[in-house]
C-alpha cells in the first residue's frame, strides 16, 4: 500500500484480508496459471467496454389474412437470386480470410513454461454474504472468474488467517474438476491441528449455544497457537484512496484496444477514462476514440470520435445550461452540419432536437401548448465579416430567408381556424397559412398575405382585397372582412419579428 507495487502474493494477501474483514469466506490460493494470467497480458482479450449485450429475440407479429396485398414485383427473381448469391459468396470469402488472419494473430505463442508458472489468487466460497457459488478473483485485475476457467492450471494450497490446507486432488485437468470442500480430509490436508472445518463452518460452531465447556477446553488444548501478524493495521490515506491508481493513471492493453484510466480531478478537463480502438493487432491505425468525463461544468459525460469519418458524438448529463442531451457534429465551424438533442422537459420552449446544415436549421418540439412540433429556417448568404479569433460569427450577419412552422391538430378549434403550417417568406414580404383538413375533404383552406401591398405610396398601412388571397375549402366565397384580415396581418407581422429573434437565439446557442 505504501509503495503501490508488489507481486501476485502481495496482492492476494491484501485482497483476501479486506474480503475477510468484510465478512466473505475468502482464501489465498497458491497454484499455477497461464502466461497471460501471470504476466497480466490482456492483449488477446476483448475489452469489457466493447462487449455487446445479448439481444433479446423479438416476437414476430402474425400478419393478418385481411391485410392489403402488395403490388407484384416485376423484377426477375432469378437474376436477384444470382446477384445475391454472388454477393454472399464474395462476402463469405472475405470473411473467411479475415477470420483466418485474426485467428492466426490471436493464437498465443507456445509457452515453454506452460504449467510451471506459479501464481497466487483469491478463492471466495459460497455461503457467507449470500454468495451463490464459488469463484476466483484475479488480484491484478480484480475481475472474478469461474473455478472452471482454463487460465487456472492447478492448485497447490489455500490458506486464510486461521489455517492452511494442502490440495490432495489431481489437477491434470486444471481446476475444472476440483471440489473446494475444505472439510473433506481426503481432498484437503489440513496443516495445523485444531478445527478441520473452513471459516464458515467454524464460525457457525462458535455461535452454537450447545457447545459444552469440556469440548471447548479440549479443542483449546489441541489447537495450534498461530503467531501474531507482523504487519501493521491496514490504513489507506484519503489522498491515496482518491488517486485510485499509481500516480493517478492506469493503462490496459486489450485486443485491438487501449484503455486509459485516471483518478477524478487528475485532468483539468475532467477526463477519467479513454478507450482507443485500433484496426490492427499492433495498435497503429486508430479507428475510434471514446472518452468519459466527470465533474465538468458543462455536464459532458461521453465523447466518441470516429477518426476515419471525423464524426464526433457527445452526450451530456442533465444540468447543462441549455439542457443539452447529445451533440453530433463533423466540425466546429459555424456552417458545419450538426445535430443537437435536448432534455425537452427542462427547457421553456420544449425543444427536443435541432438539426443544422450549411444554409438551414430544423427544430423539433414536443408537448407545447400551441401544438408547434417543427420549425424549419432557411438562411441566405452570410455577409463577409471577419470574426475575432476563437469566436463565432455574428448571428445577425446570417440573413433569414424563410421560416416554416408546423402544428399538430388542436381539437378545441375548428379545422378552418386551426393552422397546420405557416411560412414566412421574409425577403418577398409574404406569409402563407395552411389550415388542417376538414373531415371528408381533400384540400385544406389557405391564406396568403402580401405585406408589400398593405402600404400606399406614402407608406401608410392600408388593407385591400389584393393584400390577402383566401381559399376556403368547401365554400366558393372568400373572406371579405378586411378588418379581421388586417388584425391577423398585424399579429403575423409581430410573430415574424418574434420568430426572427428566436432563431437568432437558437443560432447563438450552438
Image: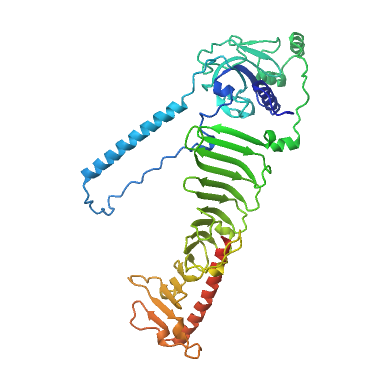
- Relative to 456, does residue 493 appear above or below in the rendering? above
Q: Quadrant of residue 234?
A: top right
Is 246 on the left or on the right of 400, as rendered? right
Is 144 on the left or on the right of 57, as rendered? right
Q: Quadrant of residue 147?
A: top right
Give the colour scheme shown. rainbow
Is 407 on the left or on the right of 212, as rendered? left
Farthest residue, direction bottom: 458
Foreground pick, 189 / 324? 324
> Which residue corresponds to the image point at 49% horizontal and 18% vertical from the top-left?
110
Q: Quadrant of residue 241?
A: top right
Quadrant of image for the C terminus:
bottom right
Foreground pick, 104 / 441? 104
Foreground pick, 439 / 48? 48
> Which residue corresponds to the image point at 53% horizontal and 22% vertical from the top-left?
151
Relative image position of residue 479 (x, y in whole percent): 40, 83
Relative image position of residue 457 (x, y in whole percent): 47, 90
| Res 286 seen here | yes
Relative image position of residue 477 (x, y in whole percent): 35, 84
Figure label count: 0
Relative image position of residue 262 (x, y in whole percent): 64, 39
- Relative to 321, does residue 133 appear above or below in the rendering? above
Quadrant of image for the N terminus:
top right
> Which residue corresponds to the image point at 40% horizontal and 31% vertical from the top-left?
99
> Which residue corresponds to the image point at 69% horizontal and 13% vertical from the top-left?
195
| Res 502 seen here | no
Amino acid at each position: 500500500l505504501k509503495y503501490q507495487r508488489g507481486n501476485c502474493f502481495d496482492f492476494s494477501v491484501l485482497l483476501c484480508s479486506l474480503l475477510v474483514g468484510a465478512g466473505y469466506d475468502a482464501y489465498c490460493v497458491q497454484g499455477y496459471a497461464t502466461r497471460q494470467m501471470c504476466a497480466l497480458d490482456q492483449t488477446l482479450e476483448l475489452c469489457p467496454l466493447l462487449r455487446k449485450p445479448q439481444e433479446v429475440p423479438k416476437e414476430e407479429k402474425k400478419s393478418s389474412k385481411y391485410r392489403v396485398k402488395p403490388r407484384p414485383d416485376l423484377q426477375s427473381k432469378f437474376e436477384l437470386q444470382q446477384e445475391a448469391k454472388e454477393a454472399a459468396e464474395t462476402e463469405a470469402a472475405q470473411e473467411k480470410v479475415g477470420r483466418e488472419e485474426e485467428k492466426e494473430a490471436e493464437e498465443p505463442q507456445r509457452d515453454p513454461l506452460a504449467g510451471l508458472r506459479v501464481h497466487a489468487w483469491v478463492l471466495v466460497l459460497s455461503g457467507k454474504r449470500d454468495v451463490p457459488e464459488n469463484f476466483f478473483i484475479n488480484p491484478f485485475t480484480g475481475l472474478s472468474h469461474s473455478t472452471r476457467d482454463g487460465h487456472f492450471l492447478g492448485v497447490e494450497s489455500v490458506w486464510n488467517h486461521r489455517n492452511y490446507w494442502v490440495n490432495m486432488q489431481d489437477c491434470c485437468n486444471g481446476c475444472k474438476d476440483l471440489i473446494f470442500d475444505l472439510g473433506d480430509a481426503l481432498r484437503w490436508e489440513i496443516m495445523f491441528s485444531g478445527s478441520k472445518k473452513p471459516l464458515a463452518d467454524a464460525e457457525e460452531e462458535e455461535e452454537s449455544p450447545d457447545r459444552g465447556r469440556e469440548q471447548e477446553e479440549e479443542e483449546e488444548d489441541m489447537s495450534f497457537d498461530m503467531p501474531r501478524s507482523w504487519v501493521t493495521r491496514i490504513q489507506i490515506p484519503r489522498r491515496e484512496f482518491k488517486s485510485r491508481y499509481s500516480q493517478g493513471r492506469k493503462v490496459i492493453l486489450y485486443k485491438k484496444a487501449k484503455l486509459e484510466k485516471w483518478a477524478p480531478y487528475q485532468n483539468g478537463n475532467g477526463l477519467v477514462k479513454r478507450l482507443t480502438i485500433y484496426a490492427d493487432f499492433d495498435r497503429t491505425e486508430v479507428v475510434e476514440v471514446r472518452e468519459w468525463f466527470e465533474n465538468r461544468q458543462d455536464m459532458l459525460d461521453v465523447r466518441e470520435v470516429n477518426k476515419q469519418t471525423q464524426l464526433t458524438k457527445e452526450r451530456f448529463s442533465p444540468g447543462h445550461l441549455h439542457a443539452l442531451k447529445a451533440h453530433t457534429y463533423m466540425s466546429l465551424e459555424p456552417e458545419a452540419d450538426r445535430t443537437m438533442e435536448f432534455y425537452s422537459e427542462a427547457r421553456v420552449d420544449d425543444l427536443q432536437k435541432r438539426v443544422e446544415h450549411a444554409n438551414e436549421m430544423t427544430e423539433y418540439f414536443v408537448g407545447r401548448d400551441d401544438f408547434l412540433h417543427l420549425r424549419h429556417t432557411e438562411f441566405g448568404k452570410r455577409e463577409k465579416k471577419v470574426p475575432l479569433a476563437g469566436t463565432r460569427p455574428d448571428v445577425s450577419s446570417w440573413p433569414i430567408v424563410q421560416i416554416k412552422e408546423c402544428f399538430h391538430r388542436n381539437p378545441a378549434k375548428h379545422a378552418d381556424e386551426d393552422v397546420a403550417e405557416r411560412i414566412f417568406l421574409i425577403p418577398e414580404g409574404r406569409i402563407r397559412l395552411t389550415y388542417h383538413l376538414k373531415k371528408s375533404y381533400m384540400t385544406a383552406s389557405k391564406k396568403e398575405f402580401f405585406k408589400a401591398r398593405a402600404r400606399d405610396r406614402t407608406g401608410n398601412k392600408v388593407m385591400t382585397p389584393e393584400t390577402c388571397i383566401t381559399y376556403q375549402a368547401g365554400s366558393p366565397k372568400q373572406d371579405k372582412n378586411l378588418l379581421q384580415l388586417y388584425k391577423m396581418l398585424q399579429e403575423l407581422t409581430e410573430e415574424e419579428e418574434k420568430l426572427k429573434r428566436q432563431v437568432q437565439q437558437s443560432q447563438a446557442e450552438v
